[in-house]
Amino acid sequence: MAVQDNPEDGLRPSHPGSTPAERGFGLAGQVAPLFAAYLAFGAFWGVWVVVFADFLQARGMSEGAAGLYLSALAAVSILTMTLLAPRLHRLALSRTVPLGLGSMGLAALGIAFGPGPGGLAGAFVFLGVGNGLIDVFVNVGGQGAEARHGRPVLQFLHASYNAGGIVGALGAAAMHVAGLSFRWQLTVTAGVLFAAAIWNVASRRLPDRAVSTAPDEERPMVSLSVFLRSPMLILPAVVVLSAFMVEGSMDIWSVIYLRRSLEATVVAGALAFAAFSLAMAVGRMLAGRLLFGLGYRTTMRVSGAGSVASGLIAALTHSATVAGVAFLFLGLFIASAAPAAFGVIGETDEDPVLAVAGLTTAGYSGFVVGPPIMGWLAETAGLRATMLVVVVAAVGVGAGGLGRRPRPAVPPSR
């Protein structure tokens, strides 16, 4: 797809050249292992959202207590993205991405079989490390490919996460019908994560290392420093934070909301989440025309408005069917928010590793306070209140798209 100039949100020209590992491979071949990584990543969360209620029952745990574990997961993810990811930039993506996938695979086994609170806490720590590494380095690889080729990559890459969510949710429903417990469902998911890790390790198509524009001696070691140097990234960070809140809330609370508040069956809940994930995937694939036509910020504004309307319907209805349809439209609208926000990085001179880590860290910061708040709301005001949090987060998506692209500097006349 040719890149079209846009007066507000046009893309930067693609970067010439490529790394030695990329030569001889087309764009699809270069990013295929990253797609597999995000597919497996999404499959884990697709399984998790379906088995979450069974996990709570088996562990004898309340929603509020689970929120504390999820908050710890987010805190570890933030530390990983803020402090660890910038220090791993010298490693090839064929090392950093599998490290994240392997950590998540071990976490899945720990959540399934870890003994006592200590084993469970350790599992969520591994899950946080894996989340942080995958979200930074998969996005780094996708953003670098998009910048070099001048073609949409990030929204298709994020769509693979949603495709994984569909596979995971439907697979969990099928295993539930077959009589497999949530522990064995998570074990199967761990196998998928390990398989994707092996593919990325063995791949010769990934870049030799993460794409970087800053010399090593000039690279700050804390990713949040990008907001001091490039304040224009603050509003995109708000969008990522809000979009992650919506997606994360759906990944955890949507099916349990349907099962306990609207009396949906496990299969019906899985189908509703699969509809949300399908809409996310389709929305991200269609977002290419929006991102390269309407522009990044207009895309964010449309995404926010549609997500607010869909979230309100899901929160106020008493019908599981209506809620499922609302989930579908919510996925369609929220799909393009995060890819659009990450795309704004191309309008700056920031190093992509730090910029992606900074935006992703900002997104995960909402998860530190979000899970305990939502768990507390679920216990005190009911699960319906968790859906209203989705609406509030969607408002942030639209508000984050209100900024304008800075005008390019006019070169001095000779």
Image (cartoon, rainbow, N blue to C red):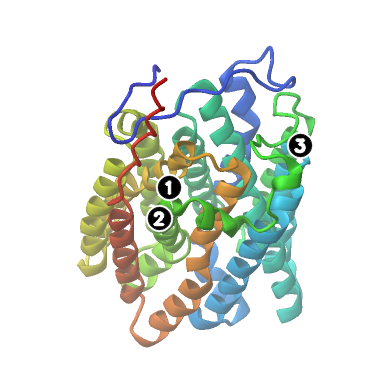
Identify residue for label 2.
243
Label 1 Cα crowd, 10 Å radius (few <14 / some 14-19 / many 20+): many
Q: Position of residue 206 (x, y in %)?
A: 70, 28
Identify residue for label 3.
92
Residue 271 horizontal side relative to residue 36, left or right? left
Dot 2: element: helix
Q: Earlier in the sequence, mark 1 or mark 3?
A: 3
Q: Residue furthest top?
A: 24
| Foreground pick, 175 / 91 | 91
Dot 3: element: loop
Q: Residue furthest front?
A: 414
Judged by depth in the image, the label closer to the viewer, 3 or 2, is: 3
Q: Is residue 150 visible?
A: yes
Quadrant location of the C terminus in the rendered image: top left
Distance from disc 1 to disc 3, alpha carbons, whole Å, reads 25 Å
| Foreground pick, 92 / 385 | 92
